[in-house]
């Protein structure tokens, strides 16, 4: 009988190993439900479009009955649409500001929100185009500029750079072609309609044959990290199938396989190491202070003796 029990244990272990290996993703382990179906309305920042199209194709190889419906635009526009009641299951923003606003309004499932990507802001010109501009500092030497609106994350980052460089007033006097999202800014420069423009590094990389990068935003001019948070939206119209499909797609977006796709398009995986390092340093400082205090007390006691 003992041999029979051991055999059953081995069979169960083998079966479990098979199930786990079938549903393994780098972010953890989950059972791959091949019967998963549903519709996932996914709102994505325009700068994510190329990478997310490829990620969708990869996801549908495992879940062919899940329909991913993308709505790509500026994060500010997407935020407004969600606030006005547009159906959305997943929101993938190009900045924390828009996501935080939706969290405060209880429109996002807060415990699902996570910063997973980082990008850079760059100054571009048409491929082989002529300009006197050599960096953000002398941006006003250009005859005109393509710039995203101030409700668009890259537009907000651009204005932060101008403020920190002390050139906002001069920039506002320029001929500005304002785009409603980063894609419009990129198109304006790549088509030669504007002398220069400000976009994300990933956007510039996507049309490297049409634009040249003049410079990356100076670290002291852009102090706000360019982070991309993603999370689940409170979709009251979603069916159980839709909700399950959205949860599975969100997990895939955070997976190692998806991250490799993002990195291919120029994004960097974001890890909140800075906060951890700060906490560690604070802990070390506290520990050192405690040790110093203990040593001082010991010396005082010894002197008293």
Image: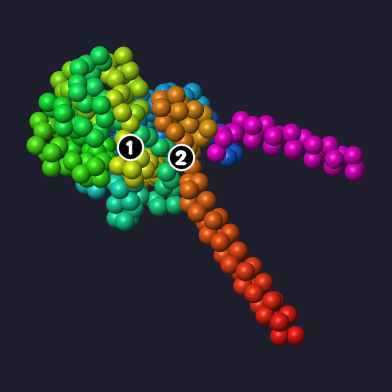
The secondary element bearing badge 2 is classed as: loop
Q: Quadrant of the C terminus?
A: bottom right
Please tell me which residue lies in front, 26 or 179.
Answer: 179
In the rendered image, residue 26 lying in the magenta stretch gets the answer yes
Residue lying at 17% horizontally and 42% vertically, measured from the top left: 168
Residue lying at 33% horizontally and 51% vertically, measured from the top left: 100
Residue lying at 16% horizontally and 23% vertically, measured from the top left: 194
Please tell me which residue lies in front, 96 or 32.
Answer: 96
Q: Which residue is mark 1?
A: 218
Residue 197 image position (x, y, % from top left): 22, 28
Q: Which residue is mark 2?
A: 270
Q: Is residue 132 left or right of residue 247?
A: left
View extreme (bottom): residue:
304
Q: Which secondary structure type mostly characterizes the magenta part of the structure?
A: helix
Residue 251 image position (x, y, % from top left): 48, 38
Q: Is residue 128 above or below residue 201?
A: above
Q: Tell me the colour scheme of the image.
A: rainbow
Quarter of the image for residue 200 reads top left
Query: Closer to us: mark 2 or mark 1?
Result: 1
Q: Is residue 293 above or below residue 41?
A: below
Residue lying at 21% horizontally and 32% vertically, measured from the top left: 138
Packing grade of label 1 (10 A; few <14, some 14-19, many >=20) is: some
Q: Is residue 75 left or right of residue 295?
A: left
First to last magenta residue range: 1-27
Q: Is residue 85 above or below residue 289?
A: above
């Amino acid at each position: 009988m003992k041999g029979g029990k051991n055999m059953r244990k081995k069979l169960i272990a083998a079966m479990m190993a098979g199930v786990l290996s079938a549903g393994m993703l780098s972010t953890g382990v989950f059972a791959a439900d091949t019967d998963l179906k549903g519709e996932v309305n996914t709102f994505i920042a325009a700068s994510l479009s190329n990478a997310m199209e490829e990620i969708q194709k990869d996801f549908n190889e495992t879940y062919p009955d899940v329909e991913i419906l993308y709505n790509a635009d500026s994060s500010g526009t997407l935020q407004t649409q969600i606030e006005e009641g547009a159906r959305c299951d997943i929101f993938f923003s190009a900045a924390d500001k828009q996501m935080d606003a939706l969290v405060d309004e209880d429109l996002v499932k807060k415990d699902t929100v996570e910063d997973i990507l980082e990008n850079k802001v760059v100054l571009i010109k048409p491929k082989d185009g002529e300009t006197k501009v050599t960096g953000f500092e002398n941006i006003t030497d250009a005859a005109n500029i393509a710039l995203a609106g101030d409700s668009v994350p890259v537009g907000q980052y651009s204005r932060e750079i101008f403020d920190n460089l002390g050139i906002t007033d001069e920039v506002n006097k320029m001929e500005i072609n304002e785009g409603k999202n980063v894609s419009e800014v990129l198109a304006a420069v790549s088509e030669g309609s504007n002398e220069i423009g400000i976009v994300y590094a990933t956007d510039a990389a996507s049309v490297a044959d049409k634009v040249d990068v003049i410079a990356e935003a100076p670290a002291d001019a852009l102090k706000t990290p360019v982070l991309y948070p993603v999370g689940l939206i409170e979709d009251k119209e979603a069916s159980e199938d839709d909700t399950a499909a959205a949860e599975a797609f969100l997990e895939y977006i955070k997976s190692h396989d998806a991250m490799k796709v993002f990195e291919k398009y120029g994004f960097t995986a974001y890890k909140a190491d800075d906060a951890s390092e700060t906490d560690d340093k604070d802990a070390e400082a506290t520990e050192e202070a405690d040790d110093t205090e203990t040593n001082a007390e010991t010396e005082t006691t010894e002197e008293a003796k």
